[in-house]
Amino acid sequence: MKLSVPDMTCNHCVASITKAIKELSSDAHVVCDLHHKVVDIANMTEELPEKIIAALDDIGFEATLLEAEA
């Protein structure tokens, strides 16, 4: 799944976002693209996009779903 995170501006943001996602699913593969402000998440167990978006919101990052793999 891909999320747009417009407030992601630095490596500290990347670390915070990655940590929040991995707390939901430790096996998640998280790739953050600072230039495009996109977070690509693979290998999620059963976490729903809504849970991930809520977790990012809890740490101060507004995120929106760009696409989800079926």
Image (cartoon, helix red, strand yellow):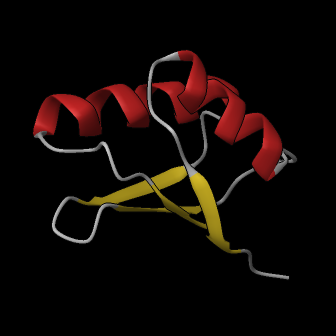
In the picture as drawn, the residue positioned furthest to the top comes out as: 58
Q: Is residue 21 left or right of residue 12?
A: right
Rendered-image quadrant of the C terminus:
bottom right
Rendered-image quadrant of the N terminus:
bottom right
Query: Where is residue 19 shown, x and y percent of the image?
Result: 43, 26
Question: Can residue 40 be seen from the camera position used here?
Answer: yes
Q: Which of the pair 55/47 is nearer the observer? A: 55
Q: Is residue 21 left or right of residue 17?
A: right
What residue is shown at x 78% (from left), y 35% (from top)?
51
Q: Quadrant of residue 64?
A: bottom right
What residue is shown at x 61% (from left), y 43% (from top)?
27
Query: Where is residue 2 shown, x and y percent of the image?
Result: 56, 68
Residue 11 against residue 19 in the figure, above or below = below
Question: Can residue 1 be seen from the camera position used here?
Answer: no
Residue 17 against residue 7 in the figure, above or below = above
What residue is shown at x 36% (from left), y 60% (from top)?
31
